[in-house]
Image (cartoon, helix red, strand yellow):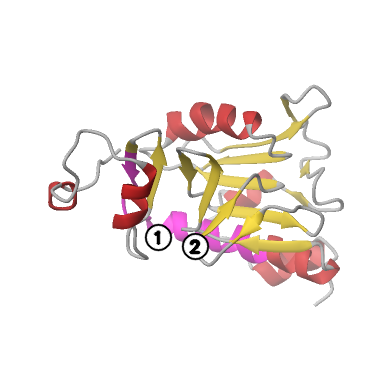
Amino acid sequence: MEIVTQERLKKIPRDQMTEAEFLDICDEDLRAEFVDGRIIVHSPASLDHVDLSTFIVTLVKMFVDKQSLGRVLGDNFQVRLRPGLRRVPDLVFISNDNKVKITKTEIDGAPDLVVEIVSPDSVERDWRDKYFEYEKAKIREYWVIDPLSKRFQMYCLNAKGKFVAQPAEKGALKSNVLRGFWLKPEWLWQEPSPNVVAVAKELKIRI
């Protein structure tokens, strides 16, 4: 985990930033999250991370667009879950029925689905911190894709507002939010990622 560079911190005459101050230093080149006054700056993504992220975003977007289910946004787009908490997931899906506010720079509210791809510096953050944050925000589904341990888990919000891990069925995990969409964990660990068109055909996404 890195903290914002000293050069940028010189602009802020205090130990902790306000949310407004964080937004003031944000630009398209800064991939950072804000958690109650603390800034988390992400290291540049590795080739494997980018390859996997592109595969997931492309596949989900193909599925969503084909059925006109809503909107899919990829990496480096802020999600403001509450005042003082801004995260930057690897993928978000907002259904047509979701009334969250989407501006040119952020989503204000809870998406229907969030995906995080674990990096070496984000293991605890993705598996623990964001798990509880996304659950509390009532995000309906949370996927954690961990290439480090080759572990993939889908968590779905139950009637009590708690995340429940989805069991694998016939070697695949099925989404509750995206009905008819499923993923084989083995696809996620291939290098390079599988041909997205071939996988789309297996998922019966007609192009």
Amino acid found under the numbered disc labelled 2 = Thr
Q: Residue at x 53, y 57 (%)?
A: 106
16 displayed left or right of 45:
left
Of circles 2 and 1, the one toward us is: 2
Tell me how far mark 2 sits from mark 1, CA to CA.
25 Å
**In which quarter of the view is residue 59 placed?**
bottom right
Quarter of the image for the N terminus: give it: top left
Task: Assess whether residue 52 is covered by the magenta stretch.
Answer: yes
Q: Residue at x 70, y 72 (%)?
A: 197
**In which quarter of the view is residue 174 placed?**
top right
The residue singled out by tag 1 in the image is: 47
192 displayed left or right of 3:
right
Label 1 residue SS:
helix
Classed neighbour count for the residue bearing mark 1: other residues with Cα under 10 Å, few (<14), some (14–19), many (≥20): few
Classed neighbour count for the residue bearing mark 2: other residues with Cα under 10 Å, few (<14), some (14–19), many (≥20): few
What are the residue bounds of the magenta stretch? 39-59
Q: Residue at x 45, y 54 (%)?
A: 49
Q: Position of residue 167 (x, y in %)?
A: 78, 30
Q: Position of residue 186 (x, y in %)?
A: 64, 47
Which label belongs to residue 195? none
Q: Is residue 118 above or below residue 193?
A: above
Decide which of 193, 138 is in the foreground and name it: 138
Amino acid found under the numbered disc labelled 1 = Leu
Asked whether the viewer can see residue 144, the reply is: yes
Going from N to C along the chain, the mark reached first, 2 or 1, is 1
156 displayed left or right of 1:
right
Q: Residue at x 51, y 26 (%)?
A: 128
The residue singled out by tag 2 in the image is: 105
Q: Is residue 97 above or below residue 64?
A: above
Asked whether the viewer can see residue 194, the reply is: no
Label 2 residue SS:
loop
148 displayed left or right of 174:
left
